[in-house]
Image (cartoon, rainbow, N blue to C red):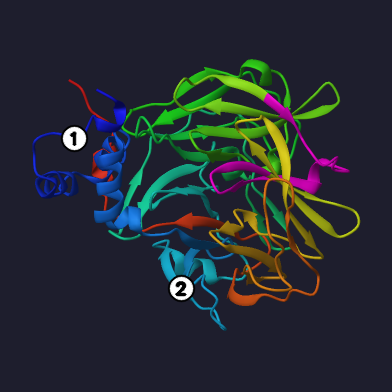
Amino acid sequence: MAMGDAGRSELPTELVVDILVRLPSITRRRVRLVCTLWRDIIDKHTTEMQSRATALLWDTWYGIAYTVDDLSKSSTGSSTQLWYADAVAAYFDFLELSSLKLIGTCNGLLCLCDNKDAPGGAVTLANPATGEEMPIPPLPCARPYVPSEYGGYTSWEDWDLAYSFAYHPTSGQYKVVHVPCSINEVYKFDALQVLTLGEASWREVPAGPAEGARCNLGAGVVSVDGATYWVIESAGASWVVSFDLENEVVTRIKGVPGHPTGPERYHLTEVHGRLGIVVRGLQKTTKVWVLDKGRGKWSCRYSLTRHDVPRPHFVFGECVLTLDGSSIYGHYRQKDVWSSSNKTVPVRVSHRARGTKLAMIGDRRGRIFPYVQTTEPLSIYAPTVTA
Protein backbone atom coordinates (compact mmCIF):
# COMPACT_ATOMS: atom_id res chain seq x y z
CA MET A 1 0.00 0.00 0.00
CA ALA A 2 1.33 3.43 -0.91
CA MET A 3 2.03 5.89 1.88
CA GLY A 4 -0.57 8.25 0.42
CA ASP A 5 -3.22 5.52 0.85
CA ALA A 6 -2.12 4.32 4.29
CA GLY A 7 -4.94 6.09 6.10
CA ARG A 8 -7.72 4.98 3.76
CA SER A 9 -10.04 2.21 4.90
CA GLU A 10 -13.63 1.09 4.65
CA LEU A 11 -14.58 3.57 7.39
CA PRO A 12 -16.69 6.53 6.27
CA THR A 13 -14.71 9.78 6.08
CA GLU A 14 -17.02 11.37 8.65
CA LEU A 15 -16.08 8.68 11.20
CA VAL A 16 -12.33 9.12 10.51
CA VAL A 17 -12.76 12.87 11.07
CA ASP A 18 -14.60 12.26 14.36
CA ILE A 19 -11.78 9.99 15.60
CA LEU A 20 -8.88 12.23 14.60
CA VAL A 21 -10.29 15.46 16.05
CA ARG A 22 -10.75 13.73 19.43
CA LEU A 23 -7.03 13.01 19.73
CA PRO A 24 -4.83 15.27 21.88
CA SER A 25 -3.12 17.95 19.81
CA ILE A 26 0.36 16.46 20.37
CA THR A 27 -0.89 13.12 18.98
CA ARG A 28 -2.62 14.84 16.05
CA ARG A 29 0.65 16.47 15.02
CA ARG A 30 2.25 13.01 14.88
CA VAL A 31 -0.48 11.10 13.05
CA ARG A 32 -0.78 14.01 10.59
CA LEU A 33 2.44 12.65 9.07
CA VAL A 34 0.97 9.19 8.35
CA CYS A 35 -0.68 10.00 5.03
CA THR A 36 -2.16 12.78 2.93
CA LEU A 37 -5.74 11.87 3.92
CA TRP A 38 -5.07 12.25 7.66
CA ARG A 39 -3.03 15.40 7.04
CA ASP A 40 -5.83 17.02 5.07
CA ILE A 41 -8.47 16.08 7.67
CA ILE A 42 -6.43 17.45 10.56
CA ASP A 43 -5.51 20.62 8.68
CA LYS A 44 -9.15 21.29 7.79
CA HIS A 45 -10.90 20.35 11.03
CA THR A 46 -8.57 21.41 13.88
CA THR A 47 -8.07 24.96 15.06
CA GLU A 48 -4.31 24.76 15.66
CA MET A 49 -3.70 23.87 12.01
CA GLN A 50 -6.09 26.50 10.70
CA SER A 51 -4.51 29.28 12.74
CA ARG A 52 -1.65 31.25 11.26
CA ALA A 53 1.04 32.24 13.73
CA THR A 54 0.92 35.82 14.91
CA ALA A 55 3.80 37.81 16.35
CA LEU A 56 4.48 37.54 20.07
CA LEU A 57 6.39 40.55 21.40
CA TRP A 58 8.49 40.05 24.52
CA ASP A 59 9.17 43.17 26.59
CA THR A 60 12.56 42.47 28.19
CA TRP A 61 12.24 45.47 30.48
CA TYR A 62 9.22 44.19 32.42
CA GLY A 63 8.97 40.53 31.37
CA ILE A 64 5.60 40.77 29.60
CA ALA A 65 4.38 39.03 26.43
CA TYR A 66 2.06 40.76 23.94
CA THR A 67 0.55 39.56 20.68
CA VAL A 68 -0.05 41.74 17.63
CA ASP A 69 -3.81 41.72 17.06
CA ASP A 70 -3.70 41.96 13.28
CA LEU A 71 -0.86 41.39 10.83
CA SER A 72 -3.07 42.20 7.84
CA LYS A 73 -2.98 45.44 5.87
CA SER A 74 -4.75 47.44 8.55
CA SER A 75 -4.10 51.17 8.81
CA THR A 76 -3.33 51.01 12.52
CA GLY A 77 -1.92 48.30 14.72
CA SER A 78 -2.62 47.23 18.29
CA SER A 79 -1.41 44.60 20.70
CA THR A 80 -2.91 42.53 23.51
CA GLN A 81 -1.17 41.52 26.71
CA LEU A 82 -0.83 37.74 26.65
CA TRP A 83 1.21 36.75 29.68
CA TYR A 84 3.20 38.24 32.55
CA ALA A 85 5.11 36.99 35.56
CA ASP A 86 3.34 36.68 38.91
CA ALA A 87 5.77 39.16 40.41
CA VAL A 88 5.47 41.61 37.53
CA ALA A 89 4.55 44.49 39.85
CA ALA A 90 8.02 44.34 41.36
CA TYR A 91 9.57 44.94 37.97
CA PHE A 92 8.12 48.42 37.76
CA ASP A 93 10.76 49.54 40.24
CA PHE A 94 12.97 51.63 37.96
CA LEU A 95 16.09 50.50 39.83
CA GLU A 96 15.69 46.85 38.84
CA LEU A 97 15.09 45.40 35.38
CA SER A 98 13.26 42.13 34.92
CA SER A 99 15.52 39.10 35.12
CA LEU A 100 12.90 36.98 33.32
CA LYS A 101 13.63 36.35 29.62
CA LEU A 102 11.80 34.44 26.90
CA ILE A 103 13.92 31.67 25.38
CA GLY A 104 11.42 30.76 22.66
CA THR A 105 7.98 29.48 21.69
CA CYS A 106 6.74 26.21 20.18
CA ASN A 107 3.13 25.36 19.29
CA GLY A 108 1.70 27.87 21.79
CA LEU A 109 4.05 26.97 24.68
CA LEU A 110 6.48 29.53 26.12
CA CYS A 111 9.91 28.61 27.49
CA LEU A 112 11.30 31.18 29.93
CA CYS A 113 14.53 31.66 31.88
CA ASP A 114 14.93 33.64 35.09
CA ASN A 115 18.51 34.87 34.89
CA LYS A 116 18.77 35.82 38.56
CA ASP A 117 18.66 32.17 39.62
CA ALA A 118 22.19 30.81 39.30
CA PRO A 119 23.78 28.76 37.96
CA GLY A 120 22.35 28.64 34.46
CA GLY A 121 19.07 30.36 35.27
CA ALA A 122 15.74 28.76 36.21
CA VAL A 123 13.87 27.48 33.15
CA THR A 124 10.06 27.29 33.16
CA LEU A 125 7.34 26.35 30.67
CA ALA A 126 4.13 28.35 30.43
CA ASN A 127 0.90 28.04 28.47
CA PRO A 128 -0.74 31.49 28.31
CA ALA A 129 -4.04 30.01 27.08
CA THR A 130 -4.49 27.79 30.17
CA GLY A 131 -2.52 29.87 32.68
CA GLU A 132 -0.34 26.88 33.57
CA GLU A 133 3.33 27.03 34.49
CA MET A 134 5.76 24.14 34.98
CA PRO A 135 9.41 24.33 36.07
CA ILE A 136 11.80 21.95 34.35
CA PRO A 137 14.69 20.18 36.13
CA PRO A 138 17.63 22.49 36.94
CA LEU A 139 20.64 22.56 34.67
CA PRO A 140 23.90 21.19 36.10
CA CYS A 141 26.29 24.09 35.57
CA ALA A 142 29.65 24.82 37.20
CA ARG A 143 30.43 28.24 35.74
CA PRO A 144 30.74 31.07 38.27
CA TYR A 145 27.89 33.52 38.70
CA VAL A 146 28.38 37.05 40.02
CA PRO A 147 25.62 39.66 39.56
CA SER A 148 26.94 43.20 39.24
CA GLU A 149 25.68 46.75 39.61
CA TYR A 150 25.86 49.41 36.90
CA GLY A 151 24.54 52.89 37.72
CA GLY A 152 22.07 51.51 40.24
CA TYR A 153 20.79 48.75 37.93
CA THR A 154 21.29 45.06 38.66
CA SER A 155 23.03 43.28 35.80
CA TRP A 156 22.41 39.55 35.51
CA GLU A 157 24.31 37.03 33.44
CA ASP A 158 22.50 36.51 30.11
CA TRP A 159 21.92 32.81 30.71
CA ASP A 160 18.84 32.80 28.47
CA LEU A 161 20.88 33.51 25.33
CA ALA A 162 22.56 30.09 25.57
CA TYR A 163 19.24 28.18 25.36
CA SER A 164 16.87 27.21 22.58
CA PHE A 165 13.39 25.69 22.83
CA ALA A 166 12.76 23.23 20.00
CA TYR A 167 10.15 20.85 18.60
CA HIS A 168 10.78 17.90 16.32
CA PRO A 169 7.79 17.48 13.98
CA THR A 170 8.29 13.76 13.30
CA SER A 171 8.90 12.47 16.83
CA GLY A 172 6.58 15.04 18.44
CA GLN A 173 9.21 15.67 21.13
CA TYR A 174 10.03 19.04 22.68
CA LYS A 175 13.64 19.64 23.68
CA VAL A 176 15.50 22.41 25.48
CA VAL A 177 19.05 22.76 24.16
CA HIS A 178 21.77 24.53 26.14
CA VAL A 179 25.04 25.63 24.53
CA PRO A 180 27.31 26.06 27.59
CA CYS A 181 29.08 29.30 26.75
CA SER A 182 28.87 32.96 27.66
CA ILE A 183 28.11 36.12 25.71
CA ASN A 184 30.42 38.12 27.98
CA GLU A 185 33.61 36.07 27.80
CA VAL A 186 35.52 33.54 25.73
CA TYR A 187 34.28 30.12 26.77
CA LYS A 188 35.04 26.88 24.96
CA PHE A 189 33.01 23.71 25.41
CA ASP A 190 33.02 20.09 24.29
CA ALA A 191 29.44 19.00 25.07
CA LEU A 192 25.88 20.32 24.91
CA GLN A 193 23.19 19.83 27.52
CA VAL A 194 19.84 18.55 26.23
CA LEU A 195 16.56 18.01 28.06
CA THR A 196 13.65 16.19 26.43
CA LEU A 197 10.35 17.24 28.01
CA GLY A 198 9.10 14.38 30.14
CA GLU A 199 12.59 13.28 31.20
CA ALA A 200 13.81 13.90 34.74
CA SER A 201 17.30 15.19 33.98
CA TRP A 202 19.57 16.77 31.38
CA ARG A 203 21.87 14.73 29.18
CA GLU A 204 25.26 15.68 27.76
CA VAL A 205 25.76 15.31 24.00
CA PRO A 206 29.23 15.55 22.38
CA ALA A 207 29.74 18.84 20.55
CA GLY A 208 31.43 17.11 17.61
CA PRO A 209 33.00 19.64 15.21
CA ALA A 210 32.06 22.45 17.63
CA GLU A 211 34.22 20.93 20.38
CA GLY A 212 36.73 23.41 21.72
CA ALA A 213 35.46 26.19 19.44
CA ARG A 214 34.30 29.59 20.58
CA CYS A 215 30.57 30.18 20.14
CA ASN A 216 29.27 33.54 18.96
CA LEU A 217 26.26 33.74 21.27
CA GLY A 218 25.57 37.23 19.98
CA ALA A 219 24.35 35.60 16.76
CA GLY A 220 21.75 33.66 18.70
CA VAL A 221 20.81 30.00 19.13
CA VAL A 222 17.74 29.17 17.02
CA SER A 223 15.75 26.03 16.26
CA VAL A 224 14.24 25.50 12.81
CA ASP A 225 12.51 22.44 11.32
CA GLY A 226 13.90 19.80 13.65
CA ALA A 227 17.40 21.22 14.20
CA THR A 228 19.12 23.74 16.48
CA TYR A 229 21.72 26.11 15.04
CA TRP A 230 24.44 28.38 16.37
CA VAL A 231 27.69 29.92 15.10
CA ILE A 232 31.25 28.98 16.06
CA GLU A 233 34.55 30.65 15.32
CA SER A 234 37.12 28.17 14.13
CA ALA A 235 40.46 28.62 12.35
CA GLY A 236 39.78 32.31 11.79
CA ALA A 237 36.41 31.72 10.13
CA SER A 238 32.77 31.68 11.28
CA TRP A 239 30.73 28.53 10.71
CA VAL A 240 27.10 27.60 11.29
CA VAL A 241 26.68 24.28 13.08
CA SER A 242 23.56 22.16 13.31
CA PHE A 243 22.31 19.90 16.09
CA ASP A 244 19.85 17.33 14.73
CA LEU A 245 17.08 16.97 17.33
CA GLU A 246 16.24 13.41 16.34
CA ASN A 247 19.69 11.83 15.94
CA GLU A 248 21.35 14.27 18.40
CA VAL A 249 24.42 14.74 16.23
CA VAL A 250 26.27 18.04 15.75
CA THR A 251 27.39 18.88 12.20
CA ARG A 252 29.28 21.84 10.82
CA ILE A 253 27.22 22.88 7.79
CA LYS A 254 28.05 26.25 6.19
CA GLY A 255 30.17 29.36 6.51
CA VAL A 256 28.48 32.67 7.32
CA PRO A 257 27.35 34.37 4.05
CA GLY A 258 27.45 38.01 3.05
CA HIS A 259 30.96 38.78 4.38
CA PRO A 260 29.94 40.55 7.62
CA THR A 261 32.54 43.02 8.92
CA GLY A 262 32.34 41.71 12.48
CA PRO A 263 30.62 39.07 14.65
CA GLU A 264 28.23 41.69 16.04
CA ARG A 265 26.86 42.51 12.58
CA TYR A 266 24.90 39.32 11.91
CA HIS A 267 22.44 37.03 13.67
CA LEU A 268 20.49 33.86 12.96
CA THR A 269 16.78 33.89 12.16
CA GLU A 270 14.02 31.71 10.69
CA VAL A 271 12.28 32.46 7.39
CA HIS A 272 9.29 30.32 6.35
CA GLY A 273 10.67 27.16 7.95
CA ARG A 274 14.25 27.69 6.76
CA LEU A 275 17.40 28.85 8.53
CA GLY A 276 18.31 32.44 7.77
CA ILE A 277 21.05 34.93 8.66
CA VAL A 278 20.53 38.68 8.91
CA VAL A 279 23.68 40.57 7.86
CA ARG A 280 23.97 44.32 8.47
CA GLY A 281 26.28 46.06 6.00
CA LEU A 282 28.27 49.26 6.39
CA GLN A 283 26.16 51.00 3.72
CA LYS A 284 22.99 50.86 5.86
CA THR A 285 21.70 47.89 3.89
CA THR A 286 20.51 44.75 5.66
CA LYS A 287 20.49 41.50 3.68
CA VAL A 288 18.84 38.28 4.78
CA TRP A 289 20.30 35.03 3.48
CA VAL A 290 18.30 31.80 3.60
CA LEU A 291 19.75 28.29 3.46
CA ASP A 292 18.22 26.19 0.69
CA LYS A 293 18.02 22.65 2.04
CA GLY A 294 17.90 21.01 -1.34
CA ARG A 295 20.97 22.75 -2.76
CA GLY A 296 22.76 23.43 0.51
CA LYS A 297 23.47 27.01 -0.59
CA TRP A 298 22.71 30.46 0.80
CA SER A 299 20.37 32.68 -1.23
CA CYS A 300 19.75 36.36 -0.59
CA ARG A 301 15.96 36.55 -0.06
CA TYR A 302 15.50 40.02 1.52
CA SER A 303 17.23 43.36 1.10
CA LEU A 304 16.26 46.26 3.36
CA THR A 305 17.70 49.76 3.02
CA ARG A 306 18.00 51.82 6.21
CA HIS A 307 15.75 49.40 8.07
CA ASP A 308 16.63 47.17 10.99
CA VAL A 309 14.72 43.96 11.79
CA PRO A 310 13.70 42.61 15.21
CA ARG A 311 15.21 39.45 16.62
CA PRO A 312 15.00 36.55 16.31
CA HIS A 313 11.93 36.45 13.97
CA PHE A 314 10.81 39.12 11.52
CA VAL A 315 8.82 37.37 8.75
CA PHE A 316 5.19 36.35 9.35
CA GLY A 317 3.45 35.13 6.22
CA GLU A 318 3.37 38.05 3.78
CA CYS A 319 4.34 40.55 6.47
CA VAL A 320 7.90 41.73 7.08
CA LEU A 321 8.53 43.43 10.43
CA THR A 322 11.05 46.23 10.86
CA LEU A 323 12.28 47.96 13.99
CA ASP A 324 12.62 51.72 14.46
CA GLY A 325 13.65 52.56 17.99
CA SER A 326 11.09 50.69 20.11
CA SER A 327 8.38 50.71 17.40
CA ILE A 328 7.49 47.70 15.23
CA TYR A 329 6.33 48.34 11.67
CA GLY A 330 4.73 45.90 9.23
CA HIS A 331 5.51 45.92 5.49
CA TYR A 332 3.35 44.10 2.97
CA ARG A 333 3.50 43.00 -0.65
CA GLN A 334 2.27 46.09 -2.43
CA LYS A 335 3.43 48.63 -4.98
CA ASP A 336 6.59 50.60 -4.12
CA VAL A 337 7.25 48.49 -1.03
CA TRP A 338 8.11 44.97 -2.18
CA SER A 339 9.37 43.75 -5.48
CA SER A 340 8.37 40.31 -6.70
CA SER A 341 10.35 37.52 -5.10
CA ASN A 342 11.64 34.26 -6.56
CA LYS A 343 14.69 32.09 -6.09
CA THR A 344 17.05 34.66 -7.58
CA VAL A 345 15.49 38.09 -6.87
CA PRO A 346 15.27 39.17 -3.22
CA VAL A 347 12.31 40.97 -1.70
CA ARG A 348 13.28 44.63 -1.34
CA VAL A 349 12.10 47.09 1.29
CA SER A 350 13.38 50.55 0.36
CA HIS A 351 14.24 53.42 2.70
CA ARG A 352 11.05 55.17 1.48
CA ALA A 353 8.81 52.38 2.81
CA ARG A 354 7.38 53.57 6.12
CA GLY A 355 5.18 50.54 6.81
CA THR A 356 2.26 50.28 9.25
CA LYS A 357 3.04 50.88 12.90
CA LEU A 358 1.86 47.75 14.70
CA ALA A 359 3.11 47.90 18.27
CA MET A 360 5.76 49.02 20.75
CA ILE A 361 8.32 46.51 21.94
CA GLY A 362 9.47 48.37 25.07
CA ASP A 363 13.07 48.77 23.95
CA ARG A 364 15.38 47.50 21.20
CA ARG A 365 16.36 44.48 23.26
CA GLY A 366 12.84 43.09 23.00
CA ARG A 367 12.28 39.83 21.17
CA ILE A 368 9.64 38.61 18.68
CA PHE A 369 8.52 34.99 18.27
CA PRO A 370 5.69 33.17 16.44
CA TYR A 371 2.67 32.24 18.53
CA VAL A 372 -0.42 30.07 17.96
CA GLN A 373 -2.79 29.46 20.86
CA THR A 374 -3.12 25.93 22.24
CA THR A 375 -5.09 24.40 25.12
CA GLU A 376 -2.62 21.54 25.45
CA PRO A 377 -2.05 20.87 29.19
CA LEU A 378 1.51 21.08 30.48
CA SER A 379 0.94 18.07 32.75
CA ILE A 380 1.54 15.68 29.86
CA TYR A 381 5.19 16.89 29.79
CA ALA A 382 5.86 16.44 33.50
CA PRO A 383 8.85 14.13 34.23
CA THR A 384 7.87 10.50 34.73
CA VAL A 385 8.64 9.32 38.25
CA THR A 386 9.64 5.68 38.55
CA ALA A 387 9.73 3.64 41.75
- Above or below, 77 relative to 147: below
- Above or below, 13 relative to 53: above
Foreground pick, 164 / 48 = 48
Of labels 2 and 1, the one closer to you = 1
On the question of residue 377 being in view, the answer is no
Q: Residues within 10 Å of mark 2 (few under 14, many from 20)?
A: some
Q: Secondary structure at mark 1?
A: loop
Quarter location, residue 222: top right
Tag 1: amino acid: Arg
The disc at residue 8 is 1
Magenta stretch holds residue 269? yes
Q: Secondary structure at mark 2?
A: loop
Label 2–label 1 contact, CB within 8 A: no
The CA distance from mark 2 to mark 1 is 39 Å
Residue drawn 48% across and 33% down? 226
Magenta stretch holds residue 78? no
Relative image position of residue 373 (x, y in whole percent): 35, 59
On the question of residue 333 being in view, the answer is yes
Residue drawn 50% across and 20% down? 204
Foreground pick, 26 / 377 = 26
Relative image position of residue 331 (x, y in whole percent): 64, 69
The disc at residue 69 is 2
Q: Which residues are magenta?
A: 253-276
Foreground pick, 363 / 351 = 351
Tag 2: amino acid: Asp
Q: Residues within 10 Å of mark 1 (few under 14, many from 20)?
A: some
Quarter location, residue 336: bottom right
Q: Is residue 300 left or right of 377 when viewed as pictured?
A: right
